[in-house]
Every structure is written in structure tokens, then in C-alpha cells.
Image: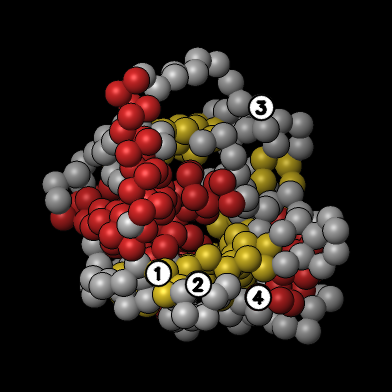
Amino acid sequence: MMVRYPNAKEHSMHAESYQRSLEDPEGFWLEAAQAIDWTRTPTQALDASKAPFYRWFPDGELNTAFNALDRHVRDGRGEQTALIWDSPVTDSVRRFTYAELLDEVARFAGALASLGVGKGDRVIVYMPMVPEAAVAMLACARLGAVHSVVFGGFAPKELAARIEDAKPKVIVAASCGIEPTRIVEYKPIIDEALASTAHQPDKVVVLQRERARADLGERDADWAELVAKASPAGPVPVAATDPLYILYTSGTTGKPKGVVRDTGGHAVALAWSMGAIYDIQPGDVWWTASDVGWVVGHSYIVYAPLLIGATTVMYEDKHPP
């Protein structure tokens, strides 16, 4: 692994930036917010009036999916690669331009909307490392719905706890996860989890993978069939303080706790971090060796690289190269 250490000039720039963030945090973060497209531009960075319940950019309004996709297409980057899916376990590689990924997300957002999903509704995403997992997350953000991604390695009991707490209107899943030595069928896990929960979703949307197709029941919907009938959905503006997602702690020390991430502060912080911390610019290629079921995967596989117009790599294998 090669580590690049900052030179003297970069050290000085970081020191100046850090000092300004301490001396003028309000101005510092309002300036950082200019990297985001707002439907209502914030005039305040931090509302600390009810500390420790802080609210970032309280008078701002935006849509994260628009910032991750639409604006790059609008600004002429539509033919740049947005996402590379590299899957050694299926011997597959797929590439999506920003225009193609926007189309996938808008159509799946339309599919979710056709099931009654709207602003503030929760959607559980129970999927392996496939591009459709990112599509589902961004589709929820597009509608103003709140996604809760559940790691595909979790068993029925763990999935049930998250269903009971989040109370999703819809569950989005794949028929299976593919590992180097086995196939994990997801639909039986979902059915067992739902057999033990008081809360029941309206629909379970299943992405069929050829390695193990799922048997669908009355409540289930086939991803491809649903999308084929859907009309693309536009981005829904939400308050910067509205939730973007819920992600649960592992539960190893008790009941899993749902951590809620807001929309505006999340977008600004991640966009700022890509250039200031990682020196990643629009058009650069970026790989995060994580899973979309974890917060690092949320932040740095899906959101941060797309917010700044970089190319993100999603890798489906338990053994990185």
C-alpha cells in the first residue's frame, strides 16, 4: 500500500483551513455549503439553540440525489463514468455513466412511488454489493424517503429487529448474495424475519439474480417488472434537517440503535471531505473497500464520490485484490 504524505504547502493550507474553522465556524461551513446545489440556500450554518440537539443549515432545502446525479448531467458530465461495479464472484464488470445512473435511479424512484413511497416513509434495503443497492439508496433520497440499509450478512433475528424499529413501507432486496464459497438466499431470511414482526411492509421488491432466483408471493414484486411499468420520478426538495437515512448499530451490546443522519449537513461534510482530506476531484476514480451496509459504504461508496462528480468503484467479493 502506498501512502502519500502531504508536502509543506499542503500542511500550511490544512493548518490555515483548520484555524479558520475554529475562529469562524459559521463562515467556514456556509462557504463549504456553496459546493452543494440548494433549492433554498441556507443563511445559517449551525443552530445550537437546543444544544446538544444541533441542527445544520436549518433554513436550507435540497435534494441529495439531485446533487449526486442530476446536476452533473446538467453541467455536461453525463457521459463520464459514475459507477464501476467489479464482481469477481460473478466474473462481471458493469459501468454506468452519470446519465445512465440517473436514469436507473429516476425509474426506480418512480417504481417506489408507484407503491406509495413518499417523503418521510422508511424503506429497508437488504442487498449485497450490487449496483442496484446504490440505485435503491439514491431512489429513496430522490423521493425524500428515508432508507435503512441492512447488511446482507445479517440473519432473520437481526433483520427483524430493524424492521420492527424502522417500520418500513417497503423492503427492497436481492434474491441472493454471492460469496466465494456459497450462495446466500435472501428471500427465506426476509420471510422468516417478517413471520416474527408485528410490523408488516406493504411490499417486498426483489431483484432476481440468476444464481438463485426467489419464489415470489402475493406481497412481493419483481424489480425488473416494477421498473418496466414505472415513470421516472423527479427529485423532491427536503429540509436540510430532514433525515436522509437510518443506520443501526450492530447490536452486539444490546438492542440495535438507529442512528439518523440529516440531509444537509451530510451532503456538505462529505463533499468537503473529498477534496480537503482525500484530494479527490471531479473525474478521479475512487474505491472504498467497505460494504453499503456500513456507514463507510454509505458515505464513501455511494454519496461522497458522486456528490463531487468522481467515479466510484463498488466491489463484490469478500477478498479484495
Q: Are marks 2 and 3 in contact (CB under 8 Å)?
A: no
Residue 230 visible, this orientation: no
Q: Residue at x 49, y 18 (%)?
A: 3
Q: Give the amino acid at mark 3.
A: His
The mark that comes first in sequence, 2 or 4, is 2
Report the Cα–Cα distance between label 3 and label 4: 32 Å
- Residue 280 pos. (x, y %): 34, 34
Q: Which mark is residue 241?
A: none
The mark that comes first in sequence, 2 or 3, is 2
Q: Are marks 1 and 2 in contact (CB under 8 Å)?
A: yes
Q: Secondary structure at mark 1?
A: strand
Report the Cα–Cα distance between label 3 and label 1: 41 Å
Q: How many marks?
A: 4
Residue placed under numbered mark 2 in the picture = 54
Question: Closest to the observer: 31 or 157?
Answer: 31
Residue placed under numbered mark 3 in the picture = 319
Q: Residues within 10 Å of mark 4 (few under 14, many from 20)?
A: many
Q: Give the amino acid at mark 4.
A: Ala
Q: Is residue 136 above or below residue 235?
A: above
Q: Nearer the viewer, mark 3 or mark 4?
A: 4
